[in-house]
Image (cartoon, coloured by chain):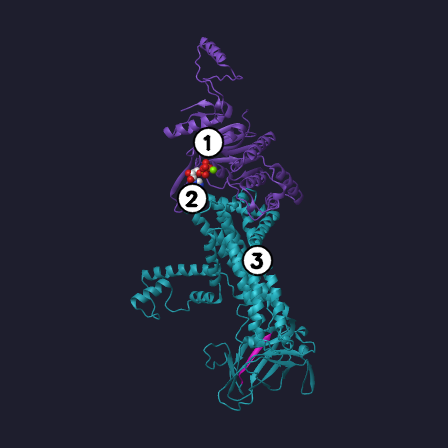
Amino acid sequence: MSQSEAVIEIRNLSKVYRDFWGRPKVKALNALSLDIRKGEVFGLLGPNGSGKTTTMKLLLGLLFPTEGEITILGKSAADVSKNERIGYLPEESYLYRFLNAYETLDFYGRLFDMSAAERKERSEKLLDLVKLAPQARRRQLKEYSKGMTRRIGVAQALINDPDLVMLDEPTSGLDPLGNRDMKDLILDLKKQGKTVLMCSHLLADVQDVCDRIAILYGGELKVMGRVDELLKAQDETQILSSKLSDAAVKDVQEVLKKHGANVLKIDHPTANLEDLFLKTVQESRERPGHRTVIEGKSAS
Amino acid sequence: MYFDPNENLIYPLYALSNWVLTTGGLMFVVLFVSLANLLVTRGKSGVGVFFAEIRGMISDVFSISPRRIWALTRLTFMEAYRRKALAVFVVFAVMFMFAGWFMGDTQEITPDQVKVYVSFVLTSISWLTLPVVLILCCFGIPEDIRLRSIHTIVTKPARRIEIVLGRMIGVSMIGVLVLLVMGTVGYIWIVRQTPERSQKFLVCRVPQYGGIKFINRDGDEGTGVNVGDIWAFRNYIEGATKARAVWQFRNVDESVLDADGNLQLENSFSAFRSYKGDMTRSLFYDIKFYNPENGVSYTTDPQPVNEFRSKLDKIPRKLTVDDVQYDLIKDLVTKNKFLHVEIACIDREQYIGMARPDLFIRMPNRPFWVGYWKAVLGIGLIVVLVSMIGVAASTIVKGPIATVLTFVLYVLSGKNSHQFMDALMSGDFKGGGVLESIYRLVTHMNPTTDLPETPAFYVVKGFDLILTSFLWLCKQVIPRLQSFNMTEFVANGFDVPFNVSILPSLLVTTAFIIPCVMLGYFALRVRELESK
Ligand SMILES: Nc1ncnc2c1ncn2[C@@H]1O[C@H](COP(=O)(O)OP(=O)(O)O)[C@@H](O)[C@H]1O
Ligand SMILES: [Mg+2]
């Protein structure tokens, strides 16, 4: 991917949560620096409590950084006008439970100063897009299941046709079908040229849709880079073929031996972002302060 | 009838300066508290943030969108509706269904009973509406923060000012709607509860008050006689002497006359007898009109004092003095439309007592509903004020605390606490300020002796001065709700005067708008909207 313009620039960002008396309680984020470029889907990974949500809230100006700088769409995080071009799906859907789906979208549409006709058209389109059942649209949100709430949450985030979409755990609470829909939606957004920042601990989702990822652990950036590069083991080659007989496997091993290569494992390939993730977490636990790979280059 | 409608009369220029003072005082408090808070939480960089936020606030004002405010207003409305806050109507309906049982059922009632009806209705309306409004305004934003639904709003282009304004307008509108419905029901109830024959008591008398001065028994200007009332509301003039009470009415012209062309003068004088005399006969007074410009004067026949009730004297327009015809308006009113009226007591060694509001020109009556709805408007203004203060408070503290705070402020804004603060500040209390009186207490010093002028004296005085200034600030910050209560006028059968009641209430209410919005803005801006 070309080094196109950065939509989000985070420099040296730290966040310390304080208690009522101003005493530091939790260091949720420590000296995070990263860029998110226009048009990419960026995944923020990390185990629970690693600071993903904190990062998003800092970007949106919901929290104030203890240290460091944020530029988002060329503006500061505290600038409300940046929100014109941002869509945000909170970790849990903090929507108004006494409104129904139409009223919800209408309300948020008004906050973008959209006209009545615009709001109506957009709501209809979005509810179709997120596949909210038509008979549910007039029911109050308090009657919704988790998956339905998630869908209306996404619709709410897209009401203004944003350039930058920030999704906090977009697939949480969705069934496999919903999961698939959500991934398609994200890919669709990417196709429309939008920038997507999502965080998740569900690795399969991230692997499928993200261009680049960063893995946070304990508020620190551990790994960052393109998904395909990160998953490419530098000193291994994987050979994938249709099913071989035992004899054929033996023959292949012979050939490899002739070329001086060792067969490490003959196996069915698996999604192994999980491996990377577990390895990173494992390593971080054992060797605090260690960074594995940043932007495809090894570092220590 | 001890009620002096003039107590809080405000003149327009004074009103304006009062408004500026209240707004300014409040804004000062808000800015000071915000800066202090920022300095504590952010250290030195707080100053920068403070000025950035002031700039932000100003730019917010210019990017306000009515559509966004309306969206937030509607949200407040729907929330109240769907959360069944309007169940208050049920309580109201039940109250009125049973109230009739206790009110008796007669063919004829006295004005005092009408007074009870009107007070009952207006008081119950305000006591039902205010708690609902208080809860709605104090819990809206804190609940939004607790449930974090506010995150979905502040990550949209909604400005903090709009969030505060939307809530304030929303709650006020709910309050006003509730008032309108209850007011209508209450009005119908009063009219139906009043028997046919007593409907005449449902009026709005429109008084035009004048200024009063007293002439003593020897003809000099004075203060009248105090006959020993503990509360010197009325002063007395002695009979058959030169003692007079002189009223001067302004703006007197044809419009004050009734349909038959009479000048109606209503009084509620009281009589004081220094000896028993003839108890079957009232004391008598006469009314003299005179015009100092042309020397014309006219004195009425002696009139009996109606003790404990009001009395209406009708003066015809065409007057005959020594066979010469005079016109009340043309000849007895000065060029600048002043009318001088002198009251004298006729009976020797007896006294007639009067205070400024005891004599007034009665203008043509207004219908009862005019005064009634003005009184409801008064409640409406309290509703608006409470909504603003409650919403502002709720941006800083949690719902229950905001409710208590607002309620305490509401209680503090009554008549008594303001009078107490006035008294403290006027220095009428002997013994000086806080520190000085503590010093006097400890040293057993007499409050009338002066303190020795040592350096400590100045420290004490200086400290007390600071405290007094603080008190002064409190006085500006605590609204004066006295004028908002217009029930008394209507219950007593009067119209609600504009410059005595409505204008001051409007001024107090509007003076709170800017500071409350500012406070809300700052509170929502400088703190992280996590639930805490
Ligand atoms: N409001 C808060 N007050 C104090 N600590 C918090 C608050 N929010 C989050 N934290 C702490 O900050 C850390 C990071 O949390 P978060 O960003 O929510 O993690 P993630 O989204 O990656 O699961 C956690 O240790 C969490 O307990
Ligand atoms: Mg999270």
Label at residue B86: 3
Horizontal and vertical percent position of residue B482: 52, 66
Provide the secondary structure element on which disc 2 rests.
Answer: helix
Question: If you read the primary sequence from the N terminus, does the residue marked by circle 3 or circle 2 appear first?
Answer: 2
State the CA–CA distance, disc 2 to disc 1: 23 Å
Residue displayed at 41% across by 67% down:
B427
* Residue at numbered disc 1: A33
Q: Chain of mark 3?
A: B
Q: Chain of mark 1?
A: A
Horizontal and vertical percent position of residue A164: 56, 35
Q: Are marks 3 and 2 in contact (CB under 8 Å)?
A: no
Label at residue B499: none
State the CA–CA distance, disc 3 to disc 2: 43 Å
In which image quadrant can residue B101 be found? bottom right
Range of magenta residues: B242-249
Crowding near the residue tagged with mark 2, few <14, some 14–19, many ≥20 C-alpha atoms within 10 Å: some
Q: Nearer the viewer, mark 3 or mark 1?
A: 3
Q: Are marks 2 and 1 in contact (CB under 8 Å)?
A: no
Q: Colour of chain B?
A: cyan
Whether residue B502 appears in this view of the structure is: no
* Residue at numbered disc 2: B42
Q: Nearer the viewer, mark 2 or mark 1?
A: 1
Q: Nearer the viewer, residue B202 or B315?
A: B202
**Residue type at the position of mark 3:** Leu
The single residue placed furthest to the front in the displayed view is A246
Q: Colour of chain A?
A: purple
